[in-house]
Image: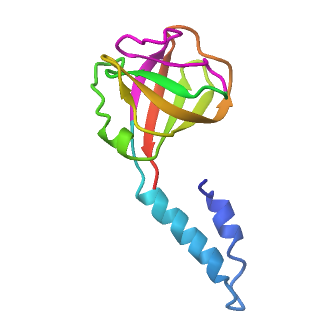
Amino acid sequence: MSMTLDEMLALLPDNTTGEIDAADLRAIVTDLYDAAHTQGVAYTFEWTDDQTPPNGKLSLNQGWQTFSTTMNLSETSADGQVLTFGTIDASRVRIVLHPATGGTLKLDTTGPSTDLGGYRSVPVQVLEITGTSPVNNESMSTAFVVLP
């Protein structure tokens, strides 16, 4: 998990004595490097309860729940962009869902997707949920971030 600027600065006390801890500097530099080298992209999808989502839709196998283990994701976003799954399948990816009515769902991929025709089944682990479940056809921003 990345540090905030305040957390980084707290690791560096007033340097009037020249005693800055090397481990703290390493933690800060590593966090800044990771943040600078993270790749990501966002798409718009719509929520669906359908486990075989049509174009532009996505769902979770257990709904908006912490125990969901699979995201079913259309290969085409709601605005017609075709997703490529090479990076998603070959990397550790964090997916963040932001429904239009608020809330957030963060999850990490746990393996490569399975091609099921017009959609993919992506194994995931839910990390955090805030807010209530989106309703059917609710628009949401969906960010895919490749983690170091």
The colour style of the image is rainbow
Asked whether 123 or 133 is in front, the reply is: 123
Asked whether 39 or 15 is in front, the reply is: 39
Q: Which residues are magenta?
A: 42-65
- The total number of labels drawn is 0
What x and y, as percent, mark residue 106?
58, 35
Q: In the image, what residue occupies the spot 68% across and 24% down?
A: 131
Asked whether 8 or 72 is in front, the reply is: 72
Q: Is residue 3 left or right of residue 136?
A: right
Q: Is residue 11 left or right of residue 80?
A: right
Q: Is residue 47 located in the magenta-colored stretch of the structure?
A: yes
What x and y, as percent, mark residue 101?
59, 18
Q: Is residue 34 left or right of residue 83?
A: right
Q: Is residue 30 above or below residue 53?
A: below
Q: Is residue 73 above or below residue 123?
A: above
Q: Is residue 55 above or below residue 97?
A: above
Q: In the image, what residue occupies the spot 41% across and 23% down?
A: 44
Q: Is residue 54 above or below residue 147?
A: above
Residue 74 location, quadrant: top left
Q: In the image, what residue occupies the spot 64% across and 17% down?
A: 133
Q: Is residue 146 located in the magenta-colored stretch of the structure?
A: no
What x and y, as percent, mark residue 82?
27, 25
What x and y, as percent, mark residue 91?
40, 47
In which quadrant is the C terminus drawn?
A: bottom left
Residue 21 location, quadrant: bottom right
